Image (tube, rainbow, N blue to C red):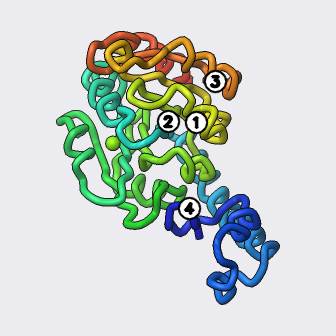
Amino acid sequence: MCLECGCNHPVPFGVKVLSVIAPGLLKPRVPDGPHTIEVHASLLAQNDDAAARNRARFASHGMLALNLLSSPGAGKTTLLSRTVDVFGHEQRCAVLVGDLETDNDARRIHRPHLPVVQITTGTACHLDAEMIARGLDTLSLDGVRVMFIENVGNLVCPAAFDLGETKRVVLLSATEGEDKPLKYPPIFKSADLVLLTKIDVADALGFDIATAVENIRRIAPQAELIQLSARSGEGMDEWHDFLRHHLPV
Ligand code: MG
């Protein structure tokens, strides 16, 4: 159980968290620290098995699968809406959208040429590989070359869950602090690509792009980095080039 956010996924550093929360309250469910770690390992192993099946499924369809992660409001849905309007006419795309409730984002992204499935997670603050498998079951995957997975907005929990994606994309927007990569390093360390979004409003908000870039480079040197604005269109060509470059041959 994630004690920080109340969702039902295991916590990687359970012992540390238990030392903060009154231990007596947790005894009926979690008798001791090592036990918590075993549960965590077991659940994540189960997720990894499902992720491996998803990965094989994506590969068998010659599909690029992207897991998009960010805080709420960083611009995932707007980015996908603009992407499918242009790139979606070049390559057949599909979208799986995760939120706790509502199908608002699926409605925003939906286009006549685009299959979209909304996954509502209830209380879970992340998507897991089984949810993706069930979402894929509802889609016709024939001819789909790019599967976008919009994860639940959260910079902590989704980082631990492999969905079977080909590439992991983490968004940091100009409406957030430049130091988010320093505060939430695991998710940035897991990124293949970091998108610095909403750069059109950076000046107005006093957001220092150079500092944000420096922080991203420091925490996530392995990741490619693209600065863009889905609203103004700046950087979108570079994003589309990333997609083209990583399409399976
Ligand atoms: Mg969204």
The response on whether ligand 1 sits within 8 Å of label 1 is: no
Q: Which sits in the foreground, 222 or 1?
A: 1
Query: Which residue is labeled 1 in the image?
Result: 166
Point out the tag, 2 or 4, that comes first from the N-terminus. Answer: 4
Q: CA distance from mark 3 to mark 1?
A: 14 Å
Query: Which residue is labeled 3 in the image?
Result: 223
Disc 2 packing (10 Å; few <14; some 14–19; many ≥20)? many
Residue 176 spot, x, y in % from top left:
44, 31
- Say the numbered circle drawn on residue 66: 2
| Residues tagged 3 and 2 counted as in contact (Cβ below 8 A) | no
From the viewer's perspective, is 154 left or right of 220?
A: left
Point out the tag, 4 or 1, that comes first from the N-terminus. Answer: 4
The amino acid at mark 1 is Thr
From the viewer's perspective, is 94 left or right of 216?
A: left
Q: Is residue 63 above or below residue 4?
A: above
Q: CA distance from mark 4 to mark 1?
A: 29 Å
Look at the numbered disc 4 and give the secondary structure of its residue. Answer: loop
Look at the numbered disc 3 and give the secondary structure of its residue. Answer: loop
Q: Residue furthest right?
A: 34
Point out the tag, 3 or 2, that comes first from the N-terminus. Answer: 2
